[in-house]
Amino acid sequence: MASIVLPLASTSPSVVADNRKLVRIGGSCMPNVRGEKRRDFSFKSRSSGRITMAVAVNVSRFEGVTMAPPDPILGVSEAFRADTNDLKLNLGVGAYRTEELQPYVLNVVKKAEKLMLEKGENKEYLPIEGLAAFNKVTAELLLGAGNPVLQQGRVATVQGLSGTGSLRLAAAFIQRYFPDAKALISSPTWGNHKNIFNDARVPWSEYRYYEPKTVGLDFDGMISDIKAAPDGSFVVLHGCAHNPTGIDPTPEQWEKIADVIQEKNHIPFFDVAYQGFASGNLDEDASSVRSFVSRGLEVLIAQSYSKNLGLYAERIGAINVVCSSSDAAARVKSQLKRLARPMYSNPPVHGARIVANVVGDPSLFNEWKEEMELMAGRIKNVRQRLFDSLSQKDKSGKDWSFILRQIGMFSFTGLNKAQSDNMTNKWHVYMTKDGRISLAGLSLAKCEYLADAIIDSYHNVS
Ligand code: LMR
């Protein structure tokens, strides 16, 4: 709809005729709702001198912008905040809470921040690739400090805006240098993977991963879908603690996955969001990535420190590209920087300094490992308690043991959308509609209540 022009007999600069917004103009070009410029005129009347014409804009130029749906994960927190019921429980977003269900800032983070303050660090721009000390320690943490690929300078590491930003930068790189390649993502996967590849214009398809009957891994389906994909596809793998299912391949299965990827000349693209947070052990959680790298494969790995260091809002992570030569790594890094510059220029420094201080200092590093074990341990305890509560309360004979086989901060309950809706609408338990619950947001004290909600939703809602 176009803007409306009202001739107004007035000499005053603005006249409000009704509740529409009037834009006073005087012989200037005003853009209309479609963004086209249109000439307006002021002219003299015979009786009263100057007559001003005004444009009433009662439609926004953003009329064509439709309302976006709430984010399937972060939107759950918004709905949770709006609920006034005391029983409410936020098991939507994957964010660690204490037993009192309060956010947790790690002691090592506080110590690192104190050190940073004492040093009086400046706020100058970082280089496009990020903080050198961070990039060094993050690649070492991921691959192991003595890894030959690091010694040979074969890894291009660029600091990213946590996991999402690092994945997005790599997706932009794929789109630019492999325009015919496709990404393969697991079904299901973390809700944002699809958005990232869609926005980067990288075509994707899914490989089978989850088997509802066993609430376990569909390993045969996964292998056959990876085999069937066009050669040279980018296979997105969750390094540990698969999100949302919490189901990981066994070490033997990882080897078979690597075999097929190698046969097909695919490029593995790991998303590592929970190193140390899944098992409580940093090396164990990096073992899938390290085994692929030790085969001499070229591998992409996105890292995040949101969970394992609790640096959610600092947006700190990295993209690492392991290449077959140091020369290739240098060229890849230069292009990642070239892509980053027009997107966000250079990354934020605060989180990078925290990581560099914690991972780079032996005593803080050890303290971090202890704190991470505590966090991972609390989640394991809650997982056990939830299983016990479900098993005791549910008299139907249903086997809930799949909960114990899952790993990491999530449990994939197998509840469908209607059942998940019942969890929220009736029980005030906020969770994603795919049936995922974040055990990191659950306390031991709330397990029985949650078990009641799950049993009711599972048995009484179809
Ligand atoms: C999650 O899956 O809940 C987290 O990774 C948070 C996010 O950004 O989606």
Image (cartoon, rainbow, N blue to C red):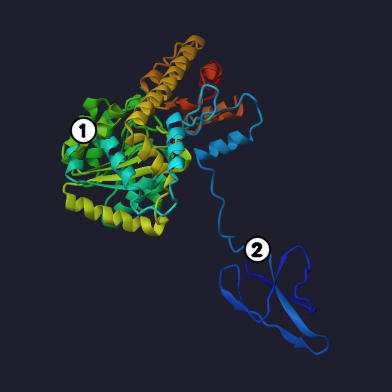
Q: Of residues 279 and 151, which is closer to you in this image?
A: 151
Look at 45% across and 38% down and name the residue there: 113
Q: Quadrant of residue 77?
A: top right
What residue is rendered at 19% in x and 52% in y?
328
Residue drawn 42% across the image and 31% down it: 108
Instruction: Say which label, 1 or 2, has the lower sequence index.
Output: 2
The secondary element bearing badge 2 is classed as loop
The image quarter containing residue 342 is: bottom left
Q: Nearer the viewer, mark 1 or mark 2?
A: 1
Q: Position of residue 377 (x, y in %)?
A: 41, 20
Q: What amino acid is at disc 1?
A: Ser
- Ligand 1, image quadrant it occupies: top left
Answer above or below: position of 50 versus 34.
below
Q: Which percent across, then down, holds residue 306? A: 42, 37
> In which image quadrant can residue 124 be found?
bottom left
Camera-side residue of 121 and 44: 121
Q: Which residue is mark 1?
A: 291
Question: Dot 2: few (<14), some (14–19), or many (≥20) neighbours within 10 Å?
Answer: some
Q: In the depicted view, which residue is nearer to us: 452 or 85?
A: 85
Could you give the CA–CA distance between mark 1 and mark 2, rounded to whole angstroms? 58 Å
Within 10 Å of disc 1 (Cα), the crowding (few <14, some 14-19, many 20+) is some
Q: Which kind of residue does numbered mark 2 sit on?
A: Val
Could one spot residue 428 in this view of the protein?
yes
Q: Is residue 304 visible?
A: no
For the point 45% across and 51% down, which residue is it? 123
Residue reaching furthest to the right: 47
Residue where numbered disc 2 is placed: 59
Q: Is residue 1 left or right of residue 339?
A: right
Quadrant including the N terminus:
bottom right
Disc assigned to residue 371: none
Q: Position of residue 188 (x, y in %)?
A: 38, 35
